[in-house]
Image (cartoon, rainbow, N blue to C red):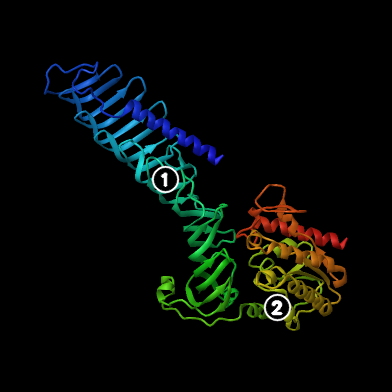
């Protein structure tokens, strides 16, 4: 539908300006040669005329000097129903004026020089409009803005569209650099704006680095360098800022205090390698009101500090409000969160509880609706920690001081592949974790939730190994004393996309907020599938 509208718009543009060039522009008066029109009886005189026929088509009301429109006047084309109201000089449009193509409902209002517009606003009948510079051929040329919003009579927005601000050449932004705002309403998630080279009207050139803003379903947003891929994906790539203040991430998620929030991350991103923060950067923390409490600088892989800050340091790296605040010590995020959960639930009677443990797909920051989803049938306790692997959880079993729960849901294995473990190693470690949980909690009903395979995993070549981990854990379920919940397949469907998996169908990218983690809709679908499979296993 969007492309159809654009084609109609382009057609209307050509039609309107074609009318202007063919029938309503140029020199309005005959050049003193009679031109088939009436000639003032006294040459050299200034006259005020009304409904004066310059020729058989053009009717003029206003000032004539030496038989040509000059000063203020109104020129009408009686055959093509066009009207120009404004200033003339020596028979041409010169000064401020307004064209109206009444049969089309379009107008052009602005400044004219020597018979052509140089700057003004072209408004279509549907109220979309261009404001900017024109060339002698009356085409959009130079700096300008094209607004795809449509407006009500009172100026309020009737329907939101795109906005392009930048350069035009001969009526098109193709090959020009400008800023395209895709979301003028400023609500919801997705790409908000991108600044880069255009390939058409208003298509953005693919396979290029530019700048932009992306908003995610979890309430976070990114602003900085963006790579627009050949297949139409917007990736965080280069230097930028990710704001987390409106999310559920606590400071402890990135090595700070659990009493704080992660306010933002400022630094490097490389979504071609890892879909989140990657490289040198600074994690900035605040209290719940947004007041700065400090920062941690380092080399990051997601929310995990994997090394020191290696780039040249300056306080100018920090957002202005954080300059002068204290640099905080980094706490091992995984262990800090784990210890916090042990302290929180260590004295809890778990005998009627559903324990959730695993990686970020299961964590309360991402799967925030889990406890509510399971509430009617199960009392869930979620201790999943983003970024963790199966061998990390296996090493923590001795420190897992919680009493035996009634049910245990485990979601791990995908990160083992993503951090570089071999397929054989990932399978062995995941099996060892399930064996360890079976020994530690022999009376609990133990479940392995199949690992999610995202768009990112296909792009990075991880997908087939992750599917192989799922297949191996499904085959090992009876021997390992657990139930395998085969639910990752719900994220595939019949709607054709660029990713097809034999036996499952097409991966549906709309369920992924960042090509790896799920959107709210994705979690609703996946979560309901987990719940249904869990209940079915108990029948």
Q: Tell me the number on the disc at residue 202.
A: none
Who is closer to the viewer here, 525 or 92?
92
Q: Position of residue 30 (x, y in %)?
A: 23, 22
Residue indicated by mark 1: 173
Distance CA(mark 1)–CA(mark 2) = 53 Å
Q: Say which residue appears at 51% left-offset and 81% top-offset.
A: 328
Q: Position of residue 430 (x, y in %)?
A: 76, 73
Rendered-image quadrant of the N terminus: top right
Classify mark 2: residues with Cα within 10 Å, few (<14), some (14-19) or many (20+): some
Residue 491, placed above or below residue 249: above
Q: Say which residue appears at 46% left-offset and 33% top-offset.
A: 11
Left or right of 281? Residue 53 is: left
Q: Secondary structure at mark 1?
A: loop
Residue 256 in sight in this render: no
Residue 460, placed above or below residue 18: below
Foreground: disc 1 or disc 2: 1
Who is closer to the viewer here, 493 or 103?
493
Do labels 1 and 2 touch, CB within 8 Å?
A: no
* Tally of marks: 2
Left or right of 26? Residue 105 is: right
Find residue 370 and report its image quarter. Answer: bottom right
Classify mark 1: residues with Cα within 10 Å, few (<14), some (14-19) or many (20+): many
Q: Tell me the number on the disc at residue 392.
A: 2
Residue 225, placed above or below residue 69: below
Q: Earlier in the sequence, mark 1 or mark 2?
A: 1
Q: Secondary structure at mark 2?
A: helix
Q: Position of residue 385 (x, y in %)?
A: 67, 72
Left or right of 41? Residue 485 is: right
Find residue 80 and report its image quarter. Answer: top left
Find residue 348 and report its image quarter. Answer: bottom right
């Amino acid at each position: 539908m969007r492309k159809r509208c654009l084609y109609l718009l382009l057609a209307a543009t050509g039609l309107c300006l074609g009318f202007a060039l063919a029938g309503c522009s140029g020199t309005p008066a005959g050049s003193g040669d009679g031109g088939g029109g009436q000639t003032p009886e006294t040459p050299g005189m200034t006259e005020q005329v009304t409904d004066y026929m310059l020729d058989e088509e053009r009717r003029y009301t206003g000032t004539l000097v030496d038989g040509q429109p000059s000063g203020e006047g109104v020129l009408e084309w009686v055959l093509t129903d066009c009207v120009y109201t404004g200033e003339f000089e020596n028979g041409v449009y010169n000064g401020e004026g307004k064209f109206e193509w009444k049969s089309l409902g379009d107008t052009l209002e602005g400044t004219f020089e020597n018979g052509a517009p140089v700057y003004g606003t072209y408004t279509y009948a549907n109220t979309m409009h261009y404001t900017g510079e024109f060339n002698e051929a009356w085409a959009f040329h130079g700096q300008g803005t094209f607004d795809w919003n449509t407006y009500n009579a009172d100026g309020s927005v009737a329907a939101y569209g795109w906005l392009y601000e930048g350069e035009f050449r001969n009526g098109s932004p193709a090959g020009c650099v400008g800023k395209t705002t895709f979301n003028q309403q400023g609500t919801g998630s997705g790409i908000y704006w991108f600044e880069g080279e255009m390939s058409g009207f208003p298509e953005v050139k693919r396979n290029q680095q530019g700048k932009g803003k992306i908003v995610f379903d979890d309430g976070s947003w990114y602003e900085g360098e963006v790579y627009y891929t050949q297949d139409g994906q917007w990736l965080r790539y280069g230097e930028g800022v990710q704001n987390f203040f409106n999310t559920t991430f606590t400071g402890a998620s990135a090595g700070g205090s659990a009493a704080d929030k992660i306010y933002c991350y400022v630094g490097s991103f490389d979504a071609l390698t890892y879909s989140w923060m990657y490289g040198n950067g600074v994690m900035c923390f605040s209290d719940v009101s947004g007041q700065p409490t400090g920062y941690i600088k380092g080399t990051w892989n997601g929310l995990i500090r994997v090394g020191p800050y290696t780039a040249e340091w300056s306080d100018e790296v920090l957002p202005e409000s954080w300059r002068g605040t204290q640099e905080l010590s980094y706490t091992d995020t995984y262990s800090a969160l784990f210890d916090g959960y042990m302290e929180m639930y260590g004295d809890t009677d778990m005998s009627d509880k559903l324990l959730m443990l695993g990686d970020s797909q299961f964590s309360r920051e991402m799967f925030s609706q889990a406890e509510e989803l399971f509430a009617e049938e199960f009392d869930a306790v979620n201790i999943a920690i983003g970024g963790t692997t199966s061998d990390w959880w296996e090493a923590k079993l001795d420190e897992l001081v919680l009493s035996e729960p009634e049910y245990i849901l485990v979601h791990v294995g995908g990160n083992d592949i993503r951090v570089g473990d071999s397929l054989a190693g990932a399978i062995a470690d995941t099996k060892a974790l399930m064996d360890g949980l079976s020994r530690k909690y022999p009376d609990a009903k133990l479940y392995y939730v199949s690992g999610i395979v995202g768009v990112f995993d296909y792009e990075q070549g991880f997908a087939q190994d992750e599917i192989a981990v799922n297949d191996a854990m499904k085959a090992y379920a009876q021997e390992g004393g657990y139930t395998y919940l085969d639910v990752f397949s719900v994220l595939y469907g019949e709607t054709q996309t660029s990713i097809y998996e034999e036996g499952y169908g097409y991966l549906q990218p709309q369920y992924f907020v960042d090509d790896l983690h799920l959107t709210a809709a994705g979690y609703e679908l996946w979560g309901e599938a987990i719940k249904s499979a869990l209940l079915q296993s108990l029948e």
